[in-house]
Image (cartoon, rainbow, N blue to C red):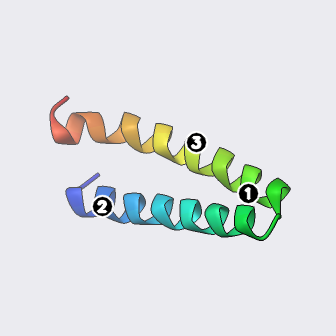
Amino acid sequence: MTKTNIAQQIVEIQTLLEIAKDNVLEDRNDDALKLLHRASREIKSVAWKVAPVLGE
């Protein structure tokens, strides 16, 4: 995984969070919760993959 791939995945996570925020504001809480769970899984996945790349 390259730093460019990492940056792209972070952008995708940000997009999920933005959509979840919009869903909350529109009272679509079930959809927001699903997106938040998905974003959480993605964050954990990226964290495991980036540790060797970023040297942690």
Badge 1: how crowded within 10 Å, few (<14), some, or many (20+)?
A: many
Q: Specify whether 20 is left or right of 6.
A: right
What kind of residue is marked 1?
A: Ala
Badge 3: how crowded within 10 Å, few (<14), some, or many (20+)?
A: few
Q: Residue at x 39, y 34 (%)?
A: 48
CA gap between label 1 and label 3 equals: 14 Å
CA gap between label 3 and label 2 equals: 16 Å
CA gap between label 2 and label 1 equals: 23 Å
Q: Residue at x 63, y 62 (%)?
A: 21
Describe the element under mark 3 as helix, strand or loop.
helix
Q: Residue at x 20, y 28 (%)?
A: 56
Pointers 3 and 2 in contact (C-beta within 8 Å)? no
Foreground of the two, 47 or 49:
47
Describe the element under mark 2 as helix, strand or loop.
helix
Check the image and report above or below for 5 versus 55.
Answer: below
Reading the chain from its start, which is encountered first: label 3 or label 2? 2
Whole-percent x, y for residue 22 in the image: 66, 70
Please identify the quarter of the rendering in which residue 29 is found: bottom right
Foreground of the two, 26 or 1:
26
Reading the chain from its start, which is encountered first: label 2 or label 1? 2
What kind of residue is marked 3?
A: Arg
Residue ID for mark 3: 41
- Disc number placed over residue 7 in the picture, else none: 2
What kind of residue is marked 2?
A: Ala
Describe the element under mark 1 as helix, strand or loop.
helix
Check the image and report above or below for 36 versus 27.
Answer: above
Q: Residue furthest left?
A: 55
Q: Residue furthest top?
A: 56
Whole-percent x, y for residue 46 in the image: 41, 44
Residue ID for mark 1: 32
Please identify the quarter of the rendering in which residue 20 is found: bottom right
